[in-house]
Image (cartoon, rainbow, N blue to C red):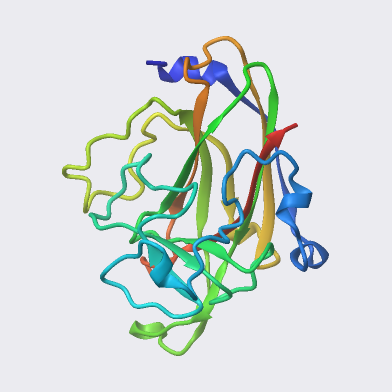
Amino acid sequence: MLNHSALAGLLLAGGVVALMAGSAQAVGFDLEKECPGNLIVNGGFETPDPSQPDKYPKAPWNTYNKGWGWFTSVPGWTWTCLRVDWGPPRALEIQRRAVATAPEGMQNLELLPNATGVACQTVSLQPGASYKLSFQYGRLMTYAWRNADKGKFIKFETTADAIYRDATTKAPAEEGAKGKPYPQDAQGFTKLVTADTRQQKEQWQRYEATFKASAAGAPASGKVQIAFTTTMRPKECGSCGSLLDAVCLQKA
């Protein structure tokens, strides 16, 4: 198994930069055209469709409408790569213009700290090749429905890290994880870039990071886990999350 120092030799982060997502890009942005050769499956979170929840595995303890739904299976994505502080059952929330207009397609993911706080995908990289990861990160903006802020329009401030590690690395055991500080330790992941709504002028902003997959220390499987994880919850609502869309991983 590849250790953490060897993985650092596999993926060398460099040229990390954050870019604003202008309104022109947010309207009619086509991920397939803008990201040829995308290594990410379902990077726009267009599947599953919350308006057709019976077609997909969904969380049994949740209600659904045409705007959002919690699903226990989302094509390309999982949460099992990272231990979090919310016990099972877990789910990923897909939104269909529920609280925001997605910058790409009709749907986006909400990184919910109380459900998983993480979304991850395993990809295959070519040793020696350079790659660019880009994504749209959004601020949750809605009316509070309880507590002292009930009825107020709030812009929830959050941060999330785009991280990576060798796909053969296993997440720590879940036992005893619930109730501990969030997030847990790095668990073998290395950070590529941090998305921070406090630095965003618009609801959505594009972030990107470039890195190189070196031949030295490459995992035998050639597979790496790319993940997004919540690193700061909104103070007004510990169960409210941040928005993710248009995830693209391609050769630079």
Q: Is residue 155 left or right of residue 59?
A: right
Locate residue 238, reporting x and y percent.
36, 66
Locate residue 34, reporting x and y percent.
77, 50
Q: Residue at x 39, y 77 (%)?
A: 64
Q: Residue at x 33, y 83 (%)?
A: 147
The residue positioned farthest toward the bottom in the image shown = 151
The residue positioned farthest toward the top in the image shown = 216
Q: Is residue 145 left or right of residue 250?
A: left
Which image quadrant for residue 134?
top right
The residue positioned farthest toward the right in the image shown = 24
Which image quadrant for residue 139?
bottom right
The front one of 177 and 124 is 124
Locate residue 220, reporting x and y percent.
47, 15
Q: Residue at x 21, y 53 (%)?
A: 179
Picture quarter with the C terminus? top right
The residue positioned farthest toward the front in the image shown = 55
Picture quarter with the N terminus? top left
Whether residue 154 can be seen here: no
Q: Residue at x 48, y 51 (%)?
A: 75
Whether residue 182 can be seen here: yes
Which image quadrant for residue 132?
top right
Classify 125 as above or below 95: above
The front one of 179 and 32 is 32
Locate residue 180, reporting x and y percent.
24, 49
| Tally of numbered discs | 0
The front one of 30 and 193 is 30
Classify 53 as above or below 174: below
Q: Is residue 92 left or right of residue 170?
A: right
Classify 3 as above or below 178: above
